[in-house]
Image (cartoon, helix red, strand yellow):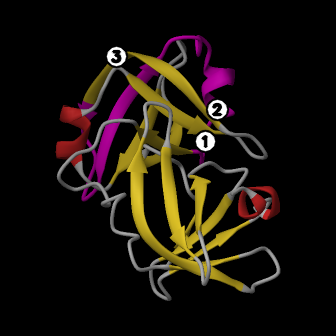
Amino acid sequence: MAKEPSPGLYPLGIIAKAQGTLGGFLMEVDDPAAMMEMSDLLYLRYPDSQWVPYRVEEIRPHQARRRSVFFVRLEGITTRTEAEQLRGLEVKTDRFTESSPDPDNVTGYTVLRSDETRMGEVADLMDTPAYKILVVQSSDRIVLIPWMEQFVTEVDDGSRTIRTRNTADLEALE
């Protein structure tokens, strides 16, 4: 299954609908336990934009049949109209939980350039204070690629591949 990279962010759920008049909304989640372990920030991705952090003002379980739903209010979202515009957006957290996908499981994945040619294989994933860095072993050198949307465009766990773009300058570094 292909997924877009979001360095250091882990999926929580999807915004289902606005709730109330003060900017609250209902969020469907796959793992209710993750909601109890999350940080004070949630990240939303608007169409054609990067992940935007919001501080959580309120979060509590909401009664729903056969679904895990939470009522959420975020700082800066103060009206029902603003909350209605969030419907369908994916929500992530920066806090790893036991149920989060392991971000370090890409060792051995094949790295492809934007033209679908093979660059190499992931030898390691380095942690830095800002983001992770893919250590890619090509045929004749090691290439370091920041795990950022401007470089990593897709991770496909099924085929164990990572698609990249804008890497020519990184490959030219010695």
| Helix, strand or loop for disc 1 | loop
The quadrant the C terminus occupies is bottom right
Give the mark, 1 or 3, whose residue is nearer the N terminus.
Answer: 3
- In this rendering, is residue 130 above or below 132? above
Q: Position of residue 36 (x, y in %)?
A: 19, 33
Q: Amino acid at mark 1?
A: Arg
Magenta includes 69? yes
Q: Nearer the viewer, residue 88 or 43?
A: 43
Q: Quadrant of residue 52?
A: top right
Q: Tell me the CA gap for discs 1 and 3.
A: 18 Å
Label 1–label 2 contact, CB within 8 A: yes
Q: Amino acid at mark 3?
A: Glu
Q: Residue at x 43, y 43 (%)?
A: 8
Q: Residue at x 62, y 79 (%)?
A: 140
- In this rendering, is residue 130 above or below 67? above
Residue pointed to by mark 3: 58
Residue pointed to by mark 1: 87
Q: Residue at x 73, y 50 (%)?
A: 150
Residue pointed to by mark 2: 84
Q: Position of residue 53 (x, y in %)?
A: 54, 25
Q: Amino acid at mark 2?
A: Glu
Label 2 packing within 10 angstroms: few (<14), some (14-19), many (20+) = some
Label 3 packing within 10 angstroms: few (<14), some (14-19), many (20+) = few
In magenta, the rendered stretch is 61-89
